[in-house]
Image (tube, helix red, strand yellow):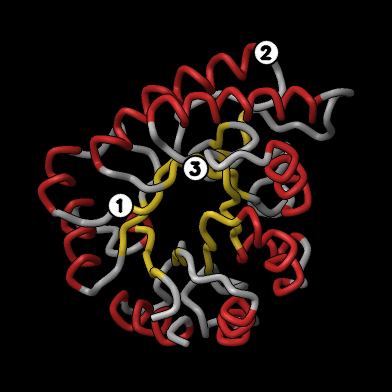
Amino acid sequence: MTFSLAACAEMLWRDRPIDWRASRLKEMGFGVGLWNWPAHDLDALQRTGATFTIMNGYLEGRLADAEGAAMLLASARETAAVGRRLGVQRLNLHGTGLGDIGIPIPRIGSHAPGAELVARDTLHRLCDLGEEMGVVFTLENLNPIDHPGCPFGSTEAVLSLVSAVNRPQLRINLDLYHTQIGEGDLVRWCKACLPWIGEVQVADNPGRCEPGTGEINYRGVATALKAMGYSGPVGMEAFARDNEEVALDAFRNAFTI
């Protein structure tokens, strides 16, 4: 198999306990993605023996102001300890915190002058933390429809920040569902981001369900990723349109090249 495949447990079998979901994904041969950890039974998750591929790397904070950066760094340190306990491979970041339905906290219409330089400094400090604790952070792009007002949410902004910092403790979580809504042109964005990609995430659009339920040619994307030399993680962060097993099989089939 060209890619290492995982799926977000938070979006599948939502009537089941999170450790059951992780165990089922492990049985099916997938790594396990998580969102926030405080509500989860960490001991139960550990007992599953699953490979945890990605988890939110903070609980609060912002990249581009001093108060928010201090909150982010403290929260990231606490979360990194949890990530190490579970063996999480990547800890995921956004430009600011997200509320329960994904709305940024706070919503920011435009950046203040110098905000990108402050964000770069915050990311360098996060890289220092990653080096100290032996963890890798990713910065994820988001789309302006589901997450209006999220600073540094576009694929272009994430690429600009991560490439400027250019340290191994910070990679891009390239979410192609968000790129499709925000910019389109998926294969070119994959190629532009390639040197800094830590993970590619997928869902079809519209609907945010598994590959094959919307407008995106994920088989073509997978073929292009392989051709450009990408062989890293691909995570399905998507709902199942009908049945979880069918959805996961569709995802596996699209990315088995």
Q: Does 70 sit above or below residue 18?
A: above
- Compared across the picture, whether 36 is left or right of 139 comes to left
- Compared across the picture, whether 91 is left or right of 31 comes to right
CA separation in Å, label 3 and label 1: 12 Å
What's under tag 1, amino acid-wise?
Answer: Phe
Q: Secondary structure at mark 1?
A: strand
Residue at 43% across, 46% down: 90
- Compared across the picture, whether 127 is left or right of 48 comes to right
Quadrant assignment for the N terminus: bottom left
What's under tag 2, amino acid-wise?
Answer: Ala
Q: Does 109 sit above or below residue 182?
A: above
What's under tag 3, amino acid-wise?
Answer: Asn
Residue 111: give x, y in percent of width and height: 83, 30
Residue at 70% across, 32% down: 107
* Foreground residue among 153 and 188: 188
The reply to whether residue 238 is in sight is no
